[in-house]
Amino acid sequence: MRINTLLLTVILIASAFFTYGGTIKGKVSDAQGGLPFATVYVEGTTQGTNANADGFFELALSPGTYRILCRYVGYKQEVFSVVIKGEEVIEHSFKLQPQSTEMNEFVFHVSSEDPAYPIIRQAIKKRKFHLEQIKSFQTSIYFKGIAHSRVLPKKVMGQKIKPEDLGVDSSGKGIMYLTEEDADYFVQGDKERTIIHSVHTSGDPKGVGFSRFPPVITFYENNVSIFGKTSRGYISPISDNALNYYKYKLEGDFTEQGHKIYKIKVMQKRPYEPCFNGTLYIVDEDFAIHSMNMLLTKTGGLDFMDTVKVDQVYIPADKDKWIIKSQVIYFTIGIFGFDMTGSGVSVYNNQRVNAPISDTMFSGNVVSSYDKIANKKDLSYWTQNRPIPLKADEVKDYVIKDSIRKVDEDPVRIDSLRRKGNKFKPLAFLLTGYTCNFKEYKNTVSTNSLLLGLSTPNIVNYNIAEGLNIAPKFHFRHTIDTGKYLYTDLALRYGFSNTHFNAIARAYYVKDDREWIGRRWIVGGEAGKYVFQYDRDNPVSEWFNTYSALLYRENDLKIYERWDATAFVKRNYGNGLSWTLKASYQVRDPLMNTTNYSIFPGNKDGFSSNLPPALVAAASGWNKHDAALLNGSVAYQPGFTYTQYPDYKIGSRSGWPIFTLTYDKGISGILNSIVNYDKWRFTIRDDIRLRLAGSLSYNIGIGGFLNTDYVSIPDLMHLYGNRGIGYASPYLQSFQFAQYYDFSNKKSLYEEVHLEYHLNGLLSNKIPFLKQAQWYLLFGGNAFYATDKTYYTEAFVGIDNIGYKLLRFLRIDFVQSWDSYMGHNSGIRFGLNSRAFTVSSGNGPVKGEW
């Protein structure tokens, strides 16, 4: 490691002799020490740099005469004149003084209000002008992101944390993450493109950093986006309605380069509103932003970090035009014993405002792209081209993380970790199952959990049709080549009460496109005999049914057996379009109750039949029979955008809805098949971000039967119900209090609506306790209608975002329902926030009914 450090130092020193032109280097400081990320640039141009976190800077210049300006928010600007003659290094340090301000007599006079208010009103009035005057914008960006650890826990969820594995010292202090990027950014109207020319991530030679790091956080928008366009955002201090949320205090003014600059303190009026606190500097006459430092805390609606601070410096580009020169985002977070702080600094150079941009720049919906060798450039490139010099600990981190990476990539270590991971752990097997990886992870085998996990089913289950049953599942994956896999699933099942043994297997081949992540083919088939629920969506959890049947004599699981032979093919284009085709031949066999055992004795008639009367009445018949079936579905979400990484491309979902069409056909006359029907369903699903007003999610479906000559029970339209005690069924696709199978039908037309409005802090930030806990209100409803005698509705109000910092995924609802059978149910449902988790069944890329 010492040799690597020495080599790196020699390269850093030697590289200084191969730069073109001269270099100005030095330190920006005040009386207390270095000023982190201070802005240094050439007057009259957009060429410049930022100091590093210790205040040291370097600025490369071609021969000529220059006036170098040094700025730091809250400090008086300094100027240094210099003549660059050739390849020379000139040292000059800036000693900045806090900006003194004066309180003059202002032209504006409004009774009993601070003189900051007339200035802010003018800034609000010109907000839209400054936002819209820049029709297009181009800039080069150097970005450096870093996260430091201040404290490390000894363990997290039982796993020991070793400081040396993270590249930090024994006390838990050090750099957790470090990345640098060099990019060009283009924006025109609502179209944008980032081209990343180089990226360097400590310890990861294949690292790609951030494909769309915030190029410019603009406070000229009413809603300021810090964490991306999908976040709720925060109210700008100069938004159209800012006076309803902020208080202002004028702290004075000063003159800089012929411009009078007002220093205004910004304070939120009420805690827990999505607001900033800090200092805003406004240019007189232009009423443009000169610079700022804005802070977000818990009382400003920040829920997963402790603090976020944004510093920005603008420079004049033309009359009335002030453009961004530098931006620094600081953050702190503490969770699970980790205490971290970090920053992301962006240096903007070569800005061009309203210059023409070719339409080809935005072609193909590519919003971000990497040069082919962006993450393959060597150390000498970064030594010569990074505008912000590295700190000593950053230089050291690159060396240490590279050493750690080499150790982690050692085949002997990888194999040792694999064998350690394969060790059988009884508690893990009880809760999550067992997974074994073979040499080089080329083959993997896993099982379902034994008894107490939430998988469906566990190995040990109970129901009144089979009694106690053992249902192990085995999942095999074989890696053929990069992006090519062979999966095999095997499920065995034996019921001790009905003495039936069942076995079914599925095999399928997956081919992933190496150059387009998300684009894949899946081809396979399955065959065997197994137990299935009448509703292919498996609404009843076998895990929960086991305990409710044994403890409460409640058995909602309704099942039948069938022989099954199926072939299927799936295609995902990675651009929002996917389709599935499936052909099946089945032999269906009804099951009857064979036991009424429960741990706590009760009425022997307490268990209902495995064949609900409503199903018998709705179907054409239910006896052992054969069925030949075809199924096809297509889903499409328009407006996908793409990121082109050095070696692959990946799509990102758009703001458009997802449209899905499904068609099922029962074919009679093939062998002994008696089913004969045509069933269709069309759905539209979307999640509309309303920024400060929250988000609106909906799933609207319409469907029905075109032909009902013979519709068996499994082929009916089944409502996704829920009779579980307390837990919620999947949001936006189920009905929280609908009785299983009471609304199954073969109607020619039905409608289904699921609607949720998440306020995301709106209103709840005014309610005691809710605002401190940062729990959010939501409400909505689910409705189904087929006829005046077959309908179901329910409404709910709830609280989500329950949890702590990053782990805010719990949700609780109160639900009230009404239906065509004069039923009125109400109660509480607990669940996982659907925005935080996507829950799916099955171990592999194919979701099956078993």
Image: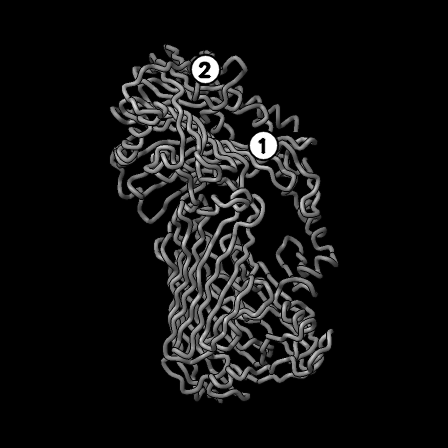
Q: Position of residue 796 (x, y in %)?
A: 48, 61
The local crowd at label 1, few if under 14, some if 14 to 19, many if 20 or more residues have their Cα within 10 Å, is some
Q: Look at mark 2 in the image and give the residue it sits on.
A: 98
Q: In the rendered view, tell whether residue 3 sits above or below residue 751.
A: above
What's under tag 1, amino acid-wise?
A: His
Q: Position of residue 471 (x, y in %)?
A: 66, 72
Residue 579: image x %, image y %? Answer: 41, 66
Quarter occupied by the C terminus: bottom right
Looking at the picture, tell me which residue is in the foreground, 680 or 162. 680
Residue 184 appears in the rendering: no
**Total labels drawn:** 2
244 on left or right of 839 = left
User: What is the x, y in percent for residue 289?
Assistant: 34, 27
Q: Nearer the viewer, mark 2 or mark 1?
A: 2
Disc 2 is placed on an element classified as: loop
Identify whether 4 is placed above or below 660: above
Can see residue 426? yes
| Separation of residues labelled 2 and 1 (CA atoms) | 28 Å
Which of these two is toward me, 184 or 497?
497
Mark number, residue 148: 1
